Image (cartoon, grey):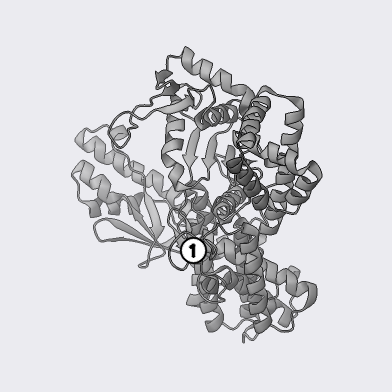
Amino acid sequence: MADPLAVLTTRLAPAFAAVRDAACAAVGTDPATVPAPPTVRRSDRADFQADGALALAKRLGRNPRELAAEVVAAADLDDLAGELDVAGPGFVNITLTEDAVVEMARRAWADPRLDLAAATDAGTVVVDYSAPNVAKEMHVGHLRSTVIGDALVRVLSHLGHHVVRENHVGDWGTPFGMLIEHLVDVGEEEAVAELSVGDLNRFYQDARASFDARDEMKERARNRVVLLQSGDAETLRLWTILVDQSIGYFQTVYDRLDVLLTSDDIVGESAYNDALPGIVADLDAQGLLVLDGGAQCVFPPGFTGRDGAPQPMIVRKGDGGYGYAATDLATIRHRVDETRADRILYVVGAPQRDHLLMVFAVARMAGWLPDDVVAEHVPFGNMLGADRKMFKTRTGTSVRLVDLLDDAVDRAAAAITDRNPDLVGDEADAVARAVGIGAIKYADLSSDRVKDYVLDFDRMLAFEGNTGPYLQYAHARIRSIFRRGEVDVSDLAGEALRIGQPQERALAMSLLGFEGAVRQTAESTQPHRLCGYLFDLAQTFTTFYEACPVLKADDPADRASRLVLADLTARTLATGLDLLGIRALDRM
């Protein structure tokens, strides 16, 4: 393990526990009632700072500095720490030895995984994300769920979890009566032609216009819904055309966005149709259903409306149709019983918070979501335009996601041509795609996902600051060192690594923070934590590079050591960018 913070936390735990036990024995307190976990964090006064003595002292009526001094005496850190000092109201400042820093950095450099071990609690994680609607265009509103979900899938997979990607597309419901009848009107061949080239907006809008303008169309649509729900073979065939053509188009968008989703990950709402009667029957058998206004509902405790009255969750509507909640309950039941999920992540916009919390609550009431299975809403804010309103076209319509991506790539191509006119042809096109798509993703992922953010092409495509292009350029610049020096990475030796200058030590310490950043991202479901780490690492490398000559180092031993540090930095940046779904570039 190349994470000194985690190592220190593990190694300090017995010392804190021993001090706690002795202090409890002295006053006749049961140690089980006094938790004593150390909290270790980076510090500007030393390498790390361990907290915990102050909280322990408050519980036991002791002097926190005295308890901290006892922790220092009991800690077994001789092979790691050169200095252990008590500071302030019981903080323990820890400075690692040079040998410990070098050894951990060497292990990271020698390991293709950068000495990042699989999670000890690795399990099955279902990630529900993207979720476009059949026969409707993917717009910028789908970007955040798709990009955030993709990053979490990559991070969790890298940590050894069995990750199940699920794209819960909207492929069922009353609008399909209208859509199928429009397909019949325009003809299958014409409909396929429209949908196959991604003209989903036009198809849907034309269907809606026809539906709104013609009573005869409304009647046909209602009858078609009945046929669809009853399993009429011809209606299901027409419905399948709409679904298949839409899925094919969605895949072109996913490929352009460079995310992991494929058609194999699609689990539409219709997949749970057969389970819905059983959901209602089982809730009824458990006495959880209440008839309210003709609808069958569940009233989970703790949920109220604006008037303070208990809030119902509609499972089956008065007309006999099933509500979204019924499908969501069937989905949870399947993910627990069949997929055997240990953790379920719903990467869905913040407005769905109350709905999902109610679904989770009802699922637990029914026994379908056991206490040992975690269900989490991973909410996110909106993408805003320069006017800080919802990002839309000048005419006020939603921006197609493919148009946003194309715009980013075109702007990236222009910026790259200005910076490096020598890049031409296929290589220039590939770099423009990587930079443009990477800029879009990084702008999204680097902000706290629960907050709204402003889409600003000039800022997100800048080669300075906390941007995707900056990190891609940082990686490319390091790789250029090896090209200029005609250095073969395979000739490097980890044994050459040594730390003499403060900037070398600072870079090594920054590199050792990678594992912690990845684990923190997985636990918190906040990709901006990994983004922040990578940006700090790139800046730390710049400081190192400006202070410590690499190719022109006076001492050959310094040159060899700094090349190892440079290679480890490049590999860490590349791995981190890959976990965000962004391509690292060797030239740009």
Find residue 198 and report its horizontal and vertical position in percent. Answer: 71, 53
Find residue 319 and report its horizontal and vertical position in percent. Answer: 51, 23
Q: Is residue 331 above or below residue 574?
A: above
The residue lying furthest to the right in this view is 189
What type is the residue that disc 1 sits on? Gly
Along the line of sight, which residue is nearer the eye, 158 or 210?
210
Q: Tag 1's secondary structure?
A: helix
Q: Quadrant of residue 95?
A: bottom left
Along the line of sight, which residue is nearer the eye, 490 or 435?
435
Q: Is residue 260 visible?
A: no
**Residue designated by label 1:** 532
Along the line of sight, which residue is nearer the eye, 268 or 342?
268
Find residue 21 and report its horizontal and vertical position in percent. Answer: 30, 38
Q: Quadrant of the C terminus?
A: bottom right
Along the line of sight, which residue is nearer the eye, 552 or 518?
518
Q: Residue at x 66, y 52 (%)?
A: 202
Q: Quadrant of residue 50?
A: bottom left
Q: Residue at x 66, y 58 (%)?
A: 257
Q: Is residue 230 above or below residue 568?
A: above
Find residue 158 and report its horizontal and vertical position in percent. Answer: 62, 49
Q: Residue at x 47, y 59 (%)?
A: 390
Q: Is residue 88 above or below residue 461?
A: above
Q: Is residue 78 visible?
A: yes
Q: Residue at x 26, y 45 (%)?
A: 56
How many numbered marks have been drawn onto this rendered protein structure? 1
Q: Quadrant of residue 552?
A: bottom right
510 with respect to 72 (left or right) = right
The residue lying furthest to the left in this view is 61
Mark 1 surroundings: few (<14), some (14-19) or many (≥20) residues within 10 A: some
